[in-house]
Amino acid sequence: EISRSDWSSDVCSSDLFPSHDIVEFIELRWALSSALVMLAIFFEFKKKRKFFLTFILLGSLFHYFSLLFLCVILFRFFTFKSSLVVFSLSFLVALSYKVISPSVAYAVDSEIYLIRRLFRYLNNPESSVGLFSYLRILMYFTVACSVYYFKERFSDFDIVLAKYSSLLVSISLLISFVPLLYFRSMVVSDFFMLILMTMLIFKFGLLYRSIS
């Protein structure tokens, strides 16, 4: 759902290496960075703030985009119910991007490299969030709502996991006006949502066995 050119544009000295080597190098950097971010968020679950900050900063050494996840510190101020409200609103915002973005062209003349690259991503017509991504988000929302409906059957840690997973997806949706950023952040969001889905299936399996 995202063009190969988006990845290769992520390296300043792209003329130094063959294009396929650049793609693999960037994917490796973001994979390492994502793994460190996931570990950092786990420590935030456990309220170990120093470890959270340490692993976020380590992740930023591989890819600066990891710093986006510093906002996870604010998640503790949300209730599970409010996180679902944010989730639903961010989904509507993401859909509005899908409608508006194709009709908008951006122009900027800046000496700052990050700003120039951001607007290059915005103006890339080949980069977009597809239908499958939105359907996946709807599935995640259904999973989170199911956990909320049956929350009496889940532990406090399970509820925190569901809340954080919902807010992580919300962040991805809110930045989906730049599809490349959406896909990068969804690597982390997918990981925690898949854990939540596995946990939900396990709980329903236990419930089915007790009934039968």
Image (cartoon, rainbow, N blue to C red):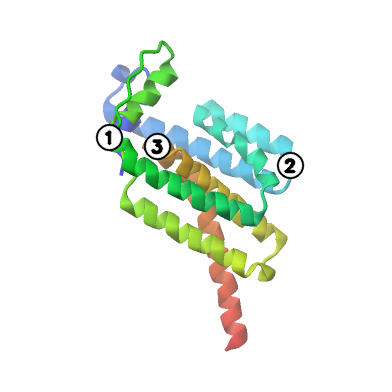
Taking depth in this image into account, of 88 and 151 the one nearest to the observer is: 88
Residue 165 versus residue 31 in the image, above or below = below
- Residue 87: x and y in percent read 53, 51
Q: Earlier in the sequence, mark 1 or mark 2?
A: 2
Label 1 sits on what residue type? Ser
Mark before the other along the chain sequence, 2 or 3: 2
Task: Tell me the quarter of the picture where residue 43 sits.
Answer: top right
What residue would you read off at disc 1?
103
- Kind of element beneath mark 3: loop
Report the disc number at residue 177.
3
Give coordinates of residue 94: x percent, y percent: 42, 44
- Tell me the number on the disc at residue 48: 2
Q: Position of residue 62 (x, y in %)?
A: 51, 29
**Callout 1 environment at 10 Å: few (<14), some (14 to 19), or many (20+)?**
few
The kind of residue on which mark 2 rests is Lys
Q: Which quadrant of the view contains residue 147?
A: bottom right
* Label disc, if present, on residue 77 of the rendered structure: none
Labelled pair 2, 3 in contact (Cβ < 8 Å)? no
